[in-house]
Image: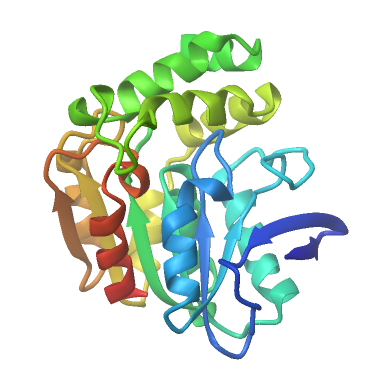
Amino acid sequence: MDLVVDGRPVFAATGGRPFDPDGAAVVLLHGAGMDHTAWGLQTRWLAHHGRRVLAVDLPGHGRSPGPALPTIPDLAHWVVRLIDAAGARQVALAGHSMGALAALAAAAAAPDRVRALALLGVTPEMPVHPELIAAAAAGEPLAAALMCAWGYGARAQLGGHRAPGLWMVGGGLRLIGEADPAALATDLRACAAYDGALAAAAAVRCPTLLLLGADDRMTPAGRAKPLAAAIAGARTTVLPGCGHMMMIERPDETLAALAEIL
């Protein structure tokens, strides 16, 4: 599905079903250097089980032209304008990593537009090593290699794909490796610079789930506790043996958690 936000085209996958803004709308936001395909299984299942889904390619990613937005608040306000462009009055938001920060900030900025919130692979601070940012900006393969080495859990590093013969980490290397270098570097800088997560969390008023990986080395589950405590009534689910890329590493468990909150 093609939308227009701020005069620029935006692509969103709908899971094979028409998007009805008057239905139970769900917006899925990907992480740094990724695109809508990170949500492949979840998008299709939700769309065929009563939800109306927009798995978005953020500006500068996938099939949405750039430039990428430079800050998390910029992304958050863009998400609100996306909801307007889709014609929806209210949506459920799910975001992964950078997308989780954007979803959190959007729910705080426009609480009347967000009915439920799912934050995957999230911590209040997301520091990024300057050498990773430099490698991303230079378009070096090292950037994707570092992100996948830290992003996937131990089981995923050894295989673990649900479909025999497919390489889980290889898919991540291909996805992030093909990202626009400028967009990836912008994403990483945005994550590193954002310091408003706890303030945004205090302003959230909707049912909220934090979905975390027990073996996540990028956003360790223990570091999410202050964020969970700052959101009234938030629930936390930790997936055992799972790294940062839970939509891919633990697709069924991730889907079960999302189906409940969304």
Residue at the (64%, 84%) spot, across then down: 21
Which quarter of the image is occupied by the N terminus? bottom right
**Residue at position x 39%, y 32% in the image:** 166
Residue 7 in the image, given as x and y percentages of width and height:
88, 59
Lateral position of residue 136 relative to residue 193, left or right = right
> Residue 85 placed where, x, y %?
75, 72
Q: Residue furthest bottom?
A: 22
Q: Is residue 62 left or right of residue 26?
A: right
Residue 53 lies, with reference to residue 37, above or below; the image says below
Q: Residue at x 47, y 77 (%)?
A: 48
* Horizontal and vertical percent position of residue 62: 67, 42
* 123 w.r.t. 111: above or below: above
At 42% from the left and 80% from the top, the residue drawn is 49
Q: How is the image coloured?
A: rainbow
Which residue is at the far left?
240
* Residue in the foreground of this view, choosing between 231 and 62: 62
- In this view, which residue lies farthest toward the right? 7
Q: Position of residue 137 (x, y in %)?
A: 64, 16
Tell me if I can see residue 74 in this picture.
yes
Q: Is residue 108 visible?
A: no
- Along the line of sight, the residue nearer the viewer: 166 or 68: 166
Q: Is residue 71 left or right of residue 197?
A: right
Query: Relative to 230, is 17 above or below?
Result: below
Q: For the C terminus, give its image quadrant.
A: bottom left
The vertical placement of 18 against 8, above or below, is below
Total marks placed: 0
